[in-house]
């Protein structure tokens, strides 16, 4: 008897293709960088397919309606909705929560702010660190929102090896307030440079997560710009004796 493909299977396949098409979570080798200077990376809402190795999420888990949540306390996956508001030009007064692309600024960037829906918007960076050690994650948090309000916009950075399990806070990765905290101010830059722990060395699937949370009252739009992930080559052993030594040093 001839086998037939059920409509449900066809639908499931189409959904899989659709999900795959809106992001490029290919693990990127080092050195990796992204400064958002190319306005063509993101051209349509919720489509990250032109951005190698970075995907933005709304963080719309909605298990909490609280504001001002410390992002260090969020260690599970938080919402799976891929999102970005594309082509916002220089409209940093844009009020919707989640990631957004401001490609018309003199220095373009992707930014994020929280909202009642986007409780914990975040970027995930997908890295292949095979052969690399002593990694560093760096980025600039930029207050790009000149709105007349003063709030506290928390940010945090975490890592995870592989696609499942808890996220681990990176030492020094918490920024208590990336907003200037001054009404109408939009020039503050918070440089962040984080040495990553040894667990991040030499991994085929390393993920780095940069997250903010819904601030009390109106959120400040904060750019996550000049992202880089760098590392050093793990020395290649030249003979059997030195290989033993290397294995001892880099055991974890
Ligand atoms: Ca930039
Ligand atoms: Ca664009
Ligand atoms: Ca501001
Ligand atoms: Ca808010």
Image: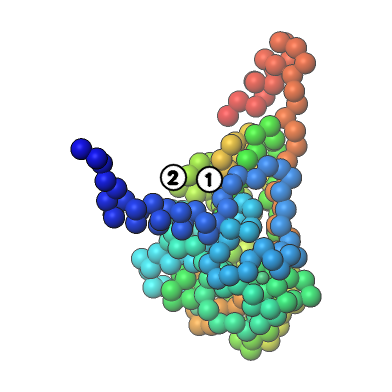
Give the residue at the far top of this rendering.
240
Query: In the rendered image, is residue 244 in sight?
Result: yes
In the rendered structure, find residue 165 and report the number of the disc placed on it. Answer: 2
x 70%, y 38%: residue: 134
Give the residue at the far left of this rendering.
1
Secondary element at tag 1: strand
x 62%, y 63%: residue: 175
Q: Residue 94: name its quadrant.
A: bottom right
Give how far across and how far down residue 69 sits, in percent. 47, 68
Between 198 and 80, the one lying in front of the other is: 80
Give the residue at the far bottom of this rendering.
148
Label 2 or label 1, whichever comes before in sequence order: 1
Q: Residues within 10 Å of mark 2 (few under 14, many from 20)?
A: few
Quadrant where the C terminus sits is top right
* Total numbered labels placed on residues in the image: 2
Disc 2 to disc 1, C-alpha distance: 8 Å
Q: Residues within 10 Å of mark 1 (few under 14, many from 20)?
A: many
221, above or below 10, in the image: below
x 71%, y 43%: residue: 30
Give how far across and how far down residue 200 sits, in percent. 61, 39
Between 248 and 209, the one lying in front of the other is: 209
What residue did someone put label 1 on?
160
In the rendered structure, find residue 62 and report the number of the disc placed on it. Answer: none
Between 165 and 66, the one lying in front of the other is: 165
Give how far across and how far down residue 112 sits, in percent. 59, 70
Give how far across and how far down residue 172 sits, in percent. 64, 54
Query: In the rendered image, is residue 223 in sight?
Result: no
Contact, CB < 8 Å: mark 2 with mark 1? yes
216, above or below 121, in the image: below
Way the structure is coloured? rainbow
Quadrant where the N terminus sits is top left
């Amino acid at each position: 008897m001839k086998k037939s493909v059920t409509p449900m299977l066809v639908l499931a396949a189409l959904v899989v293709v659709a999900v795959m098409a809106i992001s490029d979570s290919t693990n990127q080798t080092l050195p990796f960088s992204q400064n958002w200077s190319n306005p063509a990376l993101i051209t349509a809402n919720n489509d990250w397919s032109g951005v190698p190795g970075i995907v933005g999420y709304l963080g719309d888990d909605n298990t909490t309606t609280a504001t001002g949540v410390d992002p260090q306390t969020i260690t599970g996956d938080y919402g799976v909705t891929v999102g970005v508001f594309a082509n916002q030009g220089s409209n940093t007064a844009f009020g919707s929560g989640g990631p957004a692309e401001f490609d018309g600024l003199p220095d373009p960037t992707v930014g994020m702010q929280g909202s009642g829906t986007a409780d914990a918007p975040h970027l995930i960076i997908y890295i292949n660190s095979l052969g690399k050690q002593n990694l560093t994650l760096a980025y600039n948090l930029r207050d790009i929102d000149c709105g007349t309000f003063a709030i506290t916009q928390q940010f945090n950075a975490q890592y995870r090896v592989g696609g499942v399990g808890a996220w681990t806070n990176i030492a020094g990765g918490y920024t208590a307030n990336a907003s200037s905290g001054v009404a109408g101010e939009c020039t503050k830059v918070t440089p962040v440079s984080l040495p990553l722990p040894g667990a991040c060395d030499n991994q085929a699937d390393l993920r780095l997560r940069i997250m903010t949370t819904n601030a009390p009252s109106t959120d400040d739009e904060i750019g996550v710009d000049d992202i880089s992930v760098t590392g050093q080559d793990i020395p290649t052993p030249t003979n059997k004796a030195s290989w033993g030594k290397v294995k001892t040093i880099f055991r974890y």
